[in-house]
Amino acid sequence: MNVKQLLAAGACASLAFLGAPAAYAANPTATITVKWNTQAISTLTVVTDYTVASGVASQGNSIPTYYTTSSPAGGTGSCGGSAVAESAGVANFFNVTPDNTTHYTDCYYKNGADAHVFTTDGLGYALTVAGTIPHSCGAADCAGGPYILCLITVGSWANNVGAANAVASSASSAPALDNGGTNTCAHAGGITMATTGGTGGNILASQANPTGANGADFGGDIELGIPPLASSATVSQVMTYTLALN
């Protein structure tokens, strides 16, 4: 092989080397985990004697609207005597007079209370109300029977993820609490708000979703069953709404 042939062979070998893919080591990698816990934002507000505009409930400050009936029919009791403009956070039946024989007097407070719930809790929530009411004469054997306090459903008690959904009551009379001789809140279309034992009822059973941005409203009329021959008393009892987060 002469010099020219050697040079040509060397050149070819160089080109072949340059054209071969480079052999590199694999790129090292490492990982970290980024974690956080977004806390739920939750609020609960309750207004009484409420008014509604564009789906939003506001505290009222007028003389409340009352209706009266009796259980069974034919009683002589009365409700809302000497009423004046309502105070915030109060549902006042003012002067009530029991029947003097055997009839419960059913006092109905229209647009009694609206609870507004807002929560971002992804596991959902429940809403309850409870309170304590006295026996009509403070003793378990009082012939007149216990007071009855009910929250009567207004609108639909359900979670809301859409537009503001507060609803004003359309009631024009009081539903009787009597159900074949047994006075019950369910018979009037509502739940027990308070008992002599300090219990209440479920406004919304536990469900698995947060509210929408506008929250959810749970409006109710309030009905007070006054036993016959109830002893005179000035009663002021606190009803507690509880937003239970899941």
Image: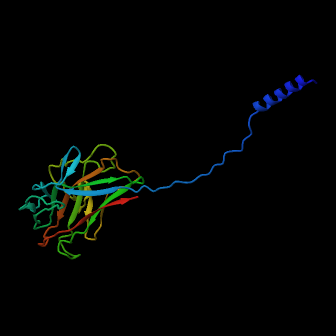
Q: Residue 244 in the image: x percent, y percent?
A: 36, 60
Q: Nearer the viewer, residue 3 or 46?
A: 3
Query: Residue pushed farthest right?
Result: 1
Name the spot of residue 161 as percent of width and height, x first. 34, 45
Where's residue 235, x and y in %?
Answer: 16, 70
Quarter of the image holding residue 183? Answer: bottom left
- Quadrant (top left, top right, bottom left, bottom right) of the C terminus: bottom left
Q: Using residue 237 as the reference point, say whether residue 85 is left or right of it.
A: left
Determine the residue positioned at 34% across, 56% down. Answer: 42
Q: Is residue 180 visible?
A: no
Q: Residue furthest toward the front? A: 3
Give how far across and how far down residue 215 sits, in percent. Answer: 30, 49
Q: Nearer the viewer, residue 58 or 78?
A: 58
Specify the quadrant of the image occupied by residue 11: top right
Vertical position of residue 141 compared to residue 63: above or below:
below
Q: Quadrant of the N terminus?
A: top right
Q: Residue at x 28, y 48 (%)?
A: 156
Give the colour scheme shown.
rainbow
Image side of residue 244 versus residue 143, left or right:
right
Is residue 21 rendered to the left or right of residue 124?
A: right
